[in-house]
Amino acid sequence: MVHEGPGVPRLIVRRLAKRYPNGKVALKGVDLTVRGGELVVILGSNGCGKSTLLRSIVRLIEPTEGQVLIDGHAVGGLDAAGLREARMACGMIFQHANLVRRRNVLANVATGALGRHRTVASAFGLLPRCELDAAVGFLREVGLVEFAQQRAGTLSGGQQQRVAIARALAQRPRLLLADEPVASLDPESAREIMALLRRLATEDGLAVLTVLHQPDLALAYADRIIGLRDGEVVFDGGPDEISASMVDLLYQRCAA
Amino acid sequence: MKRSNLLSLILLIGIGLFGQSLFVIEARLSELVTGVHGMADIIGRATPPDLSSLADIAWPALETLDIALFGTVCGVLMAIPFAVLAARNVTPSRLLYFFARSVIGLTRAVPDLIWALLFVTAVGLGPFPGALALSVHSIGMLGRLFAELIEDMDMGAVEALTLTGAGRTQVFSHAVVPTLLPSLLGIALYRFDENLRSSLVLGFVGAGGLGFHMLTAMNLFQYREVSTLLIVTFLLVVGTEQISAALRRLTA
């Protein structure tokens, strides 16, 4: 993986807003920047716009206003082909690993590179040899190379999440978004996943933006914490700057 | 109305409906009793089965099997694209959704026997119109089940692959197909069993196979050959059911 060093802004979000058709305002002009090599954690209680924010960045949800720049390229207004291109630079990890459970681990990882190989063979379910070879390397990076030929559905939750990270790495992204990646894992597996994300940021120079519900993990692994409440950024600073009262405020019930 | 009263009313309506059906179908128990003699006479004339006709039955048996095979394979191949268009969660447009749902509805609503009659008129007697009839009817039967499977599938993997920058076709072949394949195969194998039984009946309207031979033998009062045909039919149906059950277990 190309390591261009920390400091390069990989994700810039400007005045991002989202109002749903039912009138609910999920985001009220969110600004944030994530740089290469940086691990940023978003904290906030349920319904405060964390998932809407991540989904709006990759346009799984269309934001109402604002601008998203991934690697300097504006994501808003892109046509289908442009959006696919933009999404390739941005790996996404979900609460559940979202693997194809019946396929083996290696094939699951290699599917992360499908966007780079829009061939007839790949449309018929075949994976390029070079990507299967590369997938072995990504599996080694997440410590699961010995499970390459095993069905993904047979792995534990933590292992499946690591496979999902390897699949995201197969995209060769510069930015990783993670939507509550440890929410359904036991504490040990959760720490392993966070340590892996930390390593990917520090050693590979990836910009990592992750939503978490565990302030202790945020304090232990984040370079920066963003506190979201009622769709607004109410805190943006280092883990040593966030106070206990701010954490309490973030986890008070949001307004309906 | 109390629940117990409602149930009593429903039961009464059910009994009433069944009663009117006896009237409409002109059910006559006495004729069934006297008809037993006729049935016994036919069974007497049908035994022992004429095993010398087995060699002549081999080809129509293969025809029956192949009508079902062709009908199922073509039915599956045509049902998949219609199912994709008819599944709310993956259809590319509302217009195509209604078009696909209409095709599936129409091909399912018209019985395979009617399709066979239409195709016999179009392409003449023989196994081919039977195979075409089963193909078209299978689009409706399979298309609906496939569409429901797609609608009920976990969309997590689809969403994940879409976000890797993969195209729509790639997402379908790498996420939807592997996820649904065992269920699709299971349904297709059940359809093959159904089509095999249907292909026997289609022979009665001139669409080839064992059914056509059975009709000819009955018209010529060759009841011993009819009983041989029935035995072969039984073995064919039970044999394929066993094989498809084993295949379903294998792909589960």
Image (tube, helix red, strand yellow):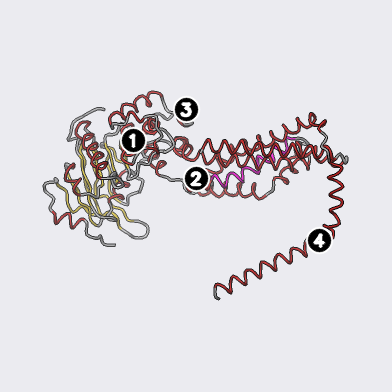
**At 65% across and 36% down in the image, what residue appears?**
B240
Residue identifier under label 2: B150
Q: In the shown orientation, is residue B55 left or right of residue B161?
A: right
Mark found first going from the N terminus, 4 or 2: 4
Residues rendered magenta in the picture: B127-146
Label 2: chain letter:
B
On whether disc 3 and disc 2 are found on a single subunit, the reply is: no
How many dots with numbers? 4
Q: Quadrant of residue B155?
A: top left
Residue identifier under label 1: A163
Q: In the shown orientation, is residue A83 left or right of residue B147?
A: left
Residue in front for this viewpoint, B98 or B182:
B182
Residue depth check, mark 3 versus mark 4: number of the one nearer the observer: 4
Residue contact between numbered discs 4 and 2, judged by CB atoms under 8 Å: no
Residue A118 location (% of width, % of height): 42, 30
Residue contact between numbered discs 3 and 2, judged by CB atoms under 8 Å: no
Residue depth check, mark 4 versus mark 2: number of the one nearer the observer: 4
On whether disc 4 and disc 1 are found on a single subunit, the reply is: no
On whether disc 4 and disc 2 are found on a single subunit, the reply is: yes
- Kind of residue indicated by mark 3: Ala
Mark found first going from the N terminus, 1 or 3: 3
Residue identifier under label 4: B29
- Separation (CA) of disc 2 from disc 1: 25 Å
- Kind of residue indicated by mark 1: Val
Q: Secondary structure at mark 3?
A: helix
Q: Residue B40 lies in magenta, yes or no?
A: no
